Image (tube, helix red, strand yellow):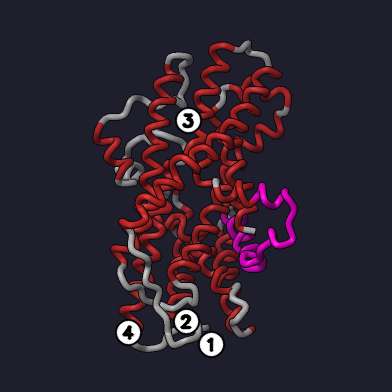
Amino acid sequence: MINLLKAGAAQLIVLHHLAFYGPMADAARPLMPPIIDWLDQYGRIAVQAFLVISGFLVAKSLSPSAMPGIGNPLGTIWRRYIKLAPPFMVAMFLAIGASALARTWMVHDSISAPPNMSQLAAHVLLLHSVLGYESLSAGAWYVAIDFQLYALITCLLWLGGRIAGNRFMPWLMPLLVTLGVSISLLYFNRDADFDVWAPYFFGSYGLGILAWWASDPRRPFIATFSLLLMMVVPAVLALELDFRIRIAVASVVACILCLYGRTRLSTYASSGWSLINYLGKISYSIFLVHFPVCLVVNAAFTRFVPNDAYLQGAGVVWAWAASVASGAVFYHWVEAPLGRFLAGLAKPVAVPTFGTKPARLRG
C-alpha cells in the first residue's frame, strides 16, 4: 500500500513540474487544457502523500510502540543525513549540468543560474531554503524539509525520554505529537512565511506518525479509538477554520495508512503489483532526477522540434517516461550503491524497549 501511494505521488509530481514549468506543456495545452491546468494547479499536492508516509515510516523506525526516548539523537539525525544528502548532491550536480546544457538551447525561467560556492554549501547542508538561496532543482526544498522533520521528531522523542525518565508513560509521545500537529495545522501551516521550516509541514508529518501508532493491531480498541481521535480532531478543526486542500489530502492519506498501511498487497499479487512495488522503491530517485531530465527534454524540443501541439505533447510524454527510466538508473547506480557504501558511517538507531513484549497504549 505504501509503495502504491509513493509510486502514484511520484508520477504526479513529475507531471506537475512538466505542466508548471513548460514550455512543452504550454504548447500542448490546447490538446487537453483541463488535464494540464489540473496538473499545474493541483499536482503538487501529491507531496502531502510523501510527508504523511515519511511520518508513518519514521514512527515505525524510531518509536514503533509510541514509547518516548532515543539513545543517541545526534547519531540518529546524522544517520538520516547520510541517507538523504549524498544522492541529493549527485542529483544537484546533474541539475547544474542540465541547466548549462538547456541554457544553450532556450531562455526560460526554469533554468537556474550557475551556482556559487556558498549556494552549493547551503545545498550540501540542506539549508538552501532557510538561507534564502535559489534551489538548484525543483523539489530540493522537500529534501531539506524531510531532514528538518526527522530532526524535529528525533528531538521530541529525546525530550519525551527525559520527561518520562524510568516511568512508564505510554501516552506521552502521542500527546506531544498531537500537540505539535495541532499547532502546525492551526497556526504555522496557515502562514506561507513559515514554509521553509519544519513546523509548517509537521501537521501532515505528524498525522502519519499517529497513523502508524493507531494501526497497531495489538492495541486495545479504546487505545486505537483514542489515537484516531488524536488524528481526526485537529485535522477537522483546521479544515473548519481554514480549508486547505493539501491538509484534506494529507488527512485522507493518513486514514488510508491507518487502515491499510501494514497490508502487503503484493501477497495477492500479479506482475502489476510487482511493477508498483518497484516504482515505489525508486520513487525517491525519480523525485531527485526528474527535473534535470525534464529540463533537457524541454530545451531540446524547444530548440529542435516545431511548435506543434501534437509534437510538443509527445515531448511531454517522452520526458515523463525518460524521468521514470532515469530514476531507475539513478537508483541502481547512485542511490543504492551510495547507501551501501555509507551504511558503515551511520550506527543503527537504538529503539527503547520495555520488557520482552512491545509496550502498548492502555485504554
Q: Could you tell me if the residues under marks 4 and 3 are in contact, i.e. CB atoms within 8 Å? A: no
Residue drawn at the location 50% of the way across and 33% of the way down: 291
Q: Could you tell me if the residues under marks 4 and 2 are in contact, i.e. CB atoms within 8 Å? A: no
User: Mark 1: which amino acid?
Assistant: Arg
Counting residues from the start of the chain, the first of labels 4 and 1 encountered is 4
Cα distance in 3D space between marks 4 and 1: 19 Å
Q: Which mark is residue 165?
A: 4
- Residue 43 at what x, y percent from top left? 60, 41
Cα distance in 3D space between marks 4 and 3: 49 Å
Q: Which residues are magenta?
A: 247-276
- Residue 245 at what x, y percent from top left? 61, 51
Quadrant of the image containing the N terminus:
bottom right
Question: Is 357 within the magenta?
Answer: no
User: Mark 3: which amino acid?
Assistant: Pro
From this view, report whether residue 153 is shown above or below residue 11: below
**Is residue 13 visible to us here?**
yes
**Which residue in the structure is indicated by mark 2?**
171
Q: Main secondary structure of the magenta part?
A: helix
User: Mark 2: which amino acid?
Assistant: Trp
User: Mark 4: which amino acid?
Assistant: Gly
**Is residue 144 visible to us here?**
no
Q: Could you tell me if the residues under marks 2 and 1 are in contact, i.e. CB atoms within 8 Å? A: yes
